[in-house]
């Protein structure tokens, strides 16, 4: 009896260069924000003084810098595009690491929202003004703009997709690797303890508190707190293994995802975050070698057919490794 030849694996889809959602949110939104600031300024220029306040002293109380409205608009637009747009433009690069694209988009759009909100508040606050020497710093706009930018950034981040080319494994895992019962899905919350997160947040927030105290104003906190929240979220992950994939989620979204048919093998190792990866959180140790390391102890180390390697510290390392290898065995047994 002739053994039928297994059907060949489908060829990989062509690599996408640009992520459409990344282009819209990472490039289109900053450009529109910059254009909106310029358009608003030109529209309201007849009602603005020849020179408007554009800079305030350290305590946020007294203007000490002035420019013409149009010069200010173009300068702000340039800063917005270079700083905010420069951060989030990477979201458009489809082959870049997904979580990096998401984080940079979120940071960039927070900056874009903050700058645009301050510019709008600065312009509106000086309409029909006869004197601008006592114009207050628009501190409320700082917090409002950062919050709105974060909302748009989260929306854009949720629409980004991983467009890397997937490589299907063509051989089963080595027999020496662990196997086990497959009860899916396997999930685990991996990350620092609440106490550890509070300690990290306090360390990062301390400079902002000091600056606010010295400045006698609260507005520096609006600049630092988003960074604190971002850092804390980068230390909290959820690993999920099901019949189709192994994925690491962050902010409720898949940050790293590989299909179970890409698994070349999974093993268990002992990992020390600082010694092995240089710190906690999502780490990269060379090209294609990723680690989600948030504690010292057992970790599942998964190697994929594309050459990538993923290390996740979790008490369920043995269970996850056994399940992934067994799923791979079953796939080849059906071939």
Image: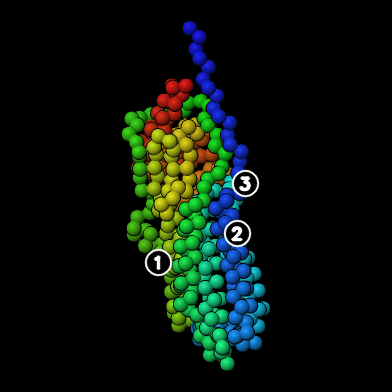
Instruction: Give residue 48's position: percent from left, percent from top.
Output: 60, 85
Quarter assignment of residue 206: bottom left
Instruction: Give residue 119's position: percent from left, percent from top.
Output: 56, 76
Q: Residue at x 63, y 65 (%)?
A: 82
Decide which of 230, 105 is in the foreground and name it. 105
Instruction: Give residue 95's position: percent from left, percent from top.
Output: 59, 46
Q: How is the image coloured?
A: rainbow
Instruction: Give residue 241's position: percent from left, percent from top.
Output: 39, 39
Decide which of 250, 198 is in the foreground and name it. 250
Up the image or down, 206 lies above or below 164; here it is below
Q: Residue at x 55, y 53 (%)?
A: 21
Of the residues under marks 1 and 3, which one precedes in the sequence?
A: 3
Q: Residue at x 51, y 39 (%)?
A: 309
Depth check, mark 1 against mark 3: the one in front is 3
Residue 57 appears in the rendering: no
Residue identified by numbered label 3: 17
Up the image or down, 97 lies above or below 212; here it is above
Depth check, mark 2 against mark 1: the one in front is 2
- Mark 3 to mark 2 CA distance (whole Å): 15 Å
Quarter assignment of residue 65: bottom right
Q: How many marks?
A: 3
Determine whether, in the image, residue 207 is placed left or right of residue 194.
right
Q: Dots 2 and 1: beta carbons under 8 Å?
A: no
Of the residues under marks 2 and 1, which one precedes in the sequence?
A: 2
Residue identified by numbered label 2: 27
Q: Residue at x 44, y 26 (%)?
A: 331
Residue identified by numbered label 1: 202
Up the image or down, 1 lies above or below 62; here it is above
Determine whether, in the image, residue 65 is placed left or right of residue 168.
right
Per the image, label 1 sits on a secondary structure element best described as: helix
């Amino acid at each position: 009896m002739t053994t039928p030849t297994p059907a060949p694996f489908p060829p990989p889809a062509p690599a996408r260069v640009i992520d459409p959602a990344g282009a819209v949110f990472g490039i289109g939104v900053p450009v529109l924000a910059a254009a909106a600031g310029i358009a608003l300024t030109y529209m309201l220029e007849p009602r603005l003084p020849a020179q408007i306040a554009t800079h305030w002293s350290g305590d946020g109380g007294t203007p000490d810098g002035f420019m013409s409205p149009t010069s200010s608009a173009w300068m702000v637009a340039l800063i917005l595009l270079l700083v905010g747009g420069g951060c989030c433009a990477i979201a458009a690069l489809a082959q870049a690491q997904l979580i990096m694209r998401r984080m940079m988009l979120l940071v960039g759009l927070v900056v874009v929202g903050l700058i645009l909100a301050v510019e709008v508040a600065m312009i509106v606050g000086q309409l029909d003004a006869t004197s601008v020497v006592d114009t207050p710093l628009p501190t409320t706009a700082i917090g409002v703009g950062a919050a709105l930018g974060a909302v748009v950034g989260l929306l854009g981040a949720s629409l980004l997709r991983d467009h890397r080319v997937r490589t299907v494994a063509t051989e089963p895992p080595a027999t020496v690797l662990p196997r086990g019962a497959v009860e899916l899905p396997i999930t685990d919350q991996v990350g620092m303890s609440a106490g550890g997160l509070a300690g990290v947040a306090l360390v990062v927030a301390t400079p902002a508190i000091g600056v606010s105290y010295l400045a006698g104003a609260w507005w520096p906190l609006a600049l630092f707190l988003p960074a604190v929240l971002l850092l804390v979220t980068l230390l909290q992950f959820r690993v999920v293994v099901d019949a189709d994939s192994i994925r690491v989620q962050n902010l409720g979204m898949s940050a790293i995802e590989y299909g179970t048919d890409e698994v070349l093998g999974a093993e268990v190792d002992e990992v020390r975050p600082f010694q092995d990866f240089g710190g906690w959180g999502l780490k990269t140790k060379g090209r294609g070698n990723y680690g989600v390391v948030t504690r010292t102890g057992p970790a599942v180390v998964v190697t994929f057919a594309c050459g990538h390697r993923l290390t996740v510290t979790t008490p369920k390392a043995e269970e996850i490794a056994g399940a992934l290898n067994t799923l791979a065995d079953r796939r080849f047994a059906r071939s």
